[in-house]
Amino acid sequence: MAYDRDLAFVYRQPTRIVFGEKTVNDTGIEVSELGCSRAFIVTDPGVIEAGLVERVEKALGSKYSGVYDGCIQDTGIHVINEAAAAAKEAGADCLVSVGGGSVIDTAKGMAILLKEGGKLEDYSGFQLLSRPQTPHVVVPTTAGTGSEATMTAVVKDWDKHQKYLFSDNYIIPNVGILDPTIVEGLPPGLTATTGMDAFTHAIEAIHTIQASPIADAMALQAIRLIYEFLPRCVEDGSDLLARGQQQCAAAMAGIAFDNAQVGIPHALAHSLGGIFKVPHGLANSIVLPHCMRFNLEECADRYALIARAMGLDVSGMSEMDAANAAIDAVAAFTGIIGVPQKLRDVGVPEDGLQEVSELAMGDGCVVYNPALIYESDQLLGVLKEAW
Ligand SMILES: [Fe+2]
């Protein structure tokens, strides 16, 4: 059995979650609650164009101290240096990130630089910080990464083509404001792929070797909500009830995997993104059912829990049959929400799979996978199935 019920664990969840339609109007109140009075907005041009930053700026009123709108996909050291300098110049005492995963990661890096100074690279690693960092309020504009409630940030050095991972309790954001009207305009394709990132987080939190009963509770409820509400979000973006449930699910899935970690679906997705620029949620979505099949022998009991969370009728079935039903339903789900099914359909050449498998072997997520990964050929086999 992959799930050791005697495993010791620490569960943490320090982020204050503020949920509801138009709660973005309370951003100023949340900043005051943190004891701050000069909030600096961190965002990207697309979010500005969608008119979302304007709403946050208005909500901040006299507590607004400035904005940095130069965030890019796969944030970089150079971006964070520039943004932190702008925030310092503005006399900021807290950060309000308005955007998706990369914007939030930018602000996490800025939070360190504004507090500690020096070179950001020096804080890359696991739990290297020793005190609370610059207060950070997140207004997510997608419902997938769960980054508003997680301890990690991934930052690229664009000159050296190197990635830095920051994993620290002290960069978990203080507040996440989940306002369904903020994600209302997200197009169906992005809604589906970012939503599948959250679905993958939740399923991975169930199958990793670091799963725990409290993280399970978060993950299983996230699976229930995503299975029910993500198709509704894709079909009708203005369905605010569905949008809100998906936002809650993404945050819960983030909390779950922040505690329980993730395994080979994310290791492969990181490599597919790094080498072939496959968007994170899309890569996860394609490899997820194949990774589950690969792991099946190790955690059929865990996948049976997922089948029940999805509401499948598995009464009278063996755990193995229920687990297989879960995997089939996960594969069918990606079809229902219109996400591509195969790596060959998203610009990945067959002769590139070897390189992806070798890069993924060095990914930190591999060690938490339920089945032991000891050679890249195991990952290559999964990739071939997904191709
Ligand atoms: Fe992810």
Image: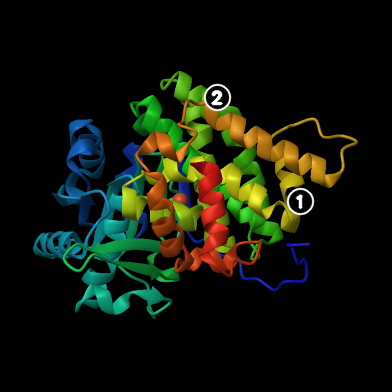
Q: Count the marks.
A: 2
Callout 2 environment at 10 Å: few (<14), some (14 to 19), or many (20+)? few
At a point 39% along the width and 29% down the height, the residue shown is 189
Kindly check if marks 1 and 2 are in contact, taking CB atoms under 8 A apart as contact. Answer: no
Left or right: where 293 falls relative to 281 = right
In the rendered image, the residue lying farthest to the left is 89
- Residue 36 falls in image quadrant: bottom left
Q: Residue at x 18, y 61 (%)?
A: 92
Q: Who is closer to the viewer here, 266 or 99?
A: 266
In the displayed structure, 97 sits above or below 91; it is: above
Q: Position of 83 compared to 225: left or right? A: left
- Residue marked by disc 1: 300
Query: Does residue 263 appear in this view?
Result: no
Can you say whether 327 is above or below 263 in the image? above
Residue toward you, 105 or 203: 203
Confirm if mark 1 falls within 8 A of ligand 1.
no
The amino acid type of the residue labelled 1 equals: Ala
State the residue position of label 2. 336
**Gap in angstroms between the C-alphas marked 1 and 2:** 24 Å
x and y percent of residue 200 in the render?
54, 46
As shown in the figure, which amino acid type bears the numbered disc 2?
A: Ile
